[in-house]
Image (tube, rainbow, N blue to C red):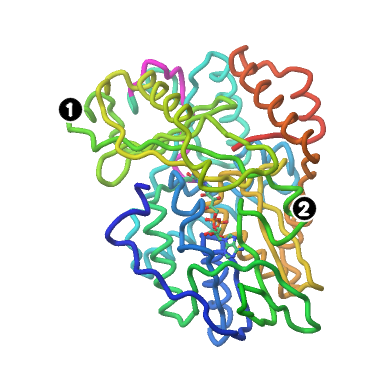
Amino acid sequence: MFWLDRPERPEPLAPLVENIDADLVIVGGGFTGLWTALLANDVDPDKDIVLIERTRIGDGGTGRNGGFVAASLTHGFGNGLSRWPEELSTLLEFGQRNLEDIETFVKLNGIDCDFRRAGEIDVAVADHQVSELRESVQQMKEFGLDVEFLDQDAMQGRVASPTYLAGLWDQHSVALVDPARLAWGLLETARRRGIRIYENTEITDFDDEHDRVVLHAGSQRVTAAKAVIATNAFPSLISSVRHRVVPVYDYVLMTEPLTDSQWRAIGWADREGVSDSGNQFHYYRPTEDGRILWGGYDAVYHSGNGFGPQFENDDDAYQRLATHFLQTFPQLDGIRFTHAWGGAIDTCSRFTAFWGTEAAGKVAYVAGFTGLGVGSSRFAAQVTLDLLDDHDSTRTRLEMVRSKPLPFPPEPLRSLGIKWTTTSLQHADAKGGRRNLWLRTLDRLGLGFDS
Ligand SMILES: Cc1cc2nc3c(=O)[nH]c(=O)nc-3n(C[C@H](O)[C@H](O)[C@H](O)COP(=O)(O)OP(=O)(O)OC[C@H]3O[C@@H](n4cnc5c(N)ncnc54)[C@H](O)[C@@H]3O)c2cc1C
């Protein structure tokens, strides 16, 4: 995997081999778990914090993603507007502050992770998407967002592709990062602060024992006053999460570094993040060493919440991605893809994180980022700590935080529903964005399937 398999990857940390006690134990060493540990330490540097990771830090979505750090906490402006119009202004403010806090943290702690406030362009690649982008720009401006509509010439002036018809340029709400180096920087900062981290240790279940929670890892026990479950798309220790989250596999290609003349052929002087605006969309971005990461489009669900390394490669998805890449950038014909990988996204039916507590409030969890958790995981971690402390705050009063997504139906209806929704979304993309009766019904119910 391009991001993770590099010489700067830290040495593995020792697994847990004894019974231990802690004030707070965090399960899962991705962005959510790491931020939870660091934010809890900010509040109380004397708190004894332990983080337990099943394999290696960053092995989940955290080390596999596109590195788009979005301010959006709602999986995009449109989803936020349709679900929480009343509190969207507050959510936008929280999101923007969250992005700025991540940037400040990276700088203050000297984390070398190519964090750049590069911005993002949503491109229209079909006629109906042009008017949709124009309308989005209008709506976003009404909420005070500084975004710009790019007509075809302006768009082509930024990045040249025969498929581009227009763009929505959002300069302020998205950064790009090298995700693994960010995770490793968070890991190093956490260790410097005395947070104990164990790798290659899987928590299999937990018990509520009066004023303590006991987590089991094989024959070892971790006893703590409080615990946070930050395990994203992995099979959850919380049974209600398994009804609300489906693991969906998303795939990525990485090109070899482009030559100067290849870069000149496509422009892209400002090296922004780009994504296209169909229901099935690609996201892509330049890397520090001059490659293009190109991912998305397919979002593959395997029956029975299928999960595991056997789904992390998909030759058909890679082939489709390569074909779409060359349709977008025919100037780069002959370029080689040097890396390809996949990873699971924790899709829920409202596309944004949700929270809850168990064990009489001693265990808090968050899941459901649906493919946009690089930035929002830090906000999610703050909320999780608020909930553990029973802390009434502007964050915990948000409807987005208090409510949960509707669960997915059991199998075989779950597989059938997802299949039918995916097919309907493909048809909508091919038919000028027109949504069939099934999609319109789901829209009315506030349900959906996305990545
Ligand atoms: C291909 C791909 C591209 C993406 N692109 C973007 C993007 O550009 N921008 C964006 O915002 N989001 C993106 N995402 C989503 C983003 O990566 C995630 O939302 C984010 O990393 C979630 O972090 P996390 O810590 O919650 O989960 P994870 O990084 O998945 O971490 C969960 C951790 O928990 C550990 N774990 C699980 N169960 C146990 C257990 N029982 N005991 C101990 N440890 C356990 C796992 O090993 C894992 O390390 C993408 C995801 C994928 C797969």
- Badge 2 vs badge 1, beta-carbon distance below 8 Å: no
Residue at far front of view: 219
Residue topped by disc 1: 261
How far across and down, in percent of the image, does residue 315 sit? Answer: 44, 30
Gap in Å between the C-alphas at discs 2 and 1? 51 Å
Residue 99 position (above or below residue 420)? below
Tell me, for residue 430, which label it has, or none.
Answer: none
Which structural element holds mark 1?
Answer: helix
Task: Kindly identify the residue that appears in the image at 69 percent across and 69 percent down.
Answer: 386
Q: Nearer the viewer, residue 232 or 285?
A: 232
Q: Is residue 109 magenta?
A: no
Type of amino acid under label 2: Glu
The residue lying at 37 percent from left, 15 percent from top is: 162
Q: Position of residue 310 (x, y in %)?
A: 52, 43
Residue 351 place in picture, x, y as percent: 66, 42
Which of the 4 image quadrants contains residue 387?
A: bottom right
For label 2, the SS is helix
Foreground residue, 349 or 79? 349
Q: Is residue 168 magenta?
A: yes
Main secondary structure of the magenta stretch:
loop
The residue located at (42%, 19%) in the rendering is: 164
Q: Write down the region rendered in magenta.
A: 160-173
Q: Residues within 10 Å of mark 1 (few under 14, many from 20)?
A: few
Residue to which mark 2 is pinned? 399
Badge 1 amino acid = Ser
Judged by depth in the image, the label closer to the viewer, 2 or 1, is 1
Q: Is residue 210 above or below residue 419?
A: below
Image quadrant where residue 189 sits? bottom left
Of residues 412 and 360, the one drawn nearer to the viewer in this rendering? 412
N-term-proximal mark, 2 vs 1? 1
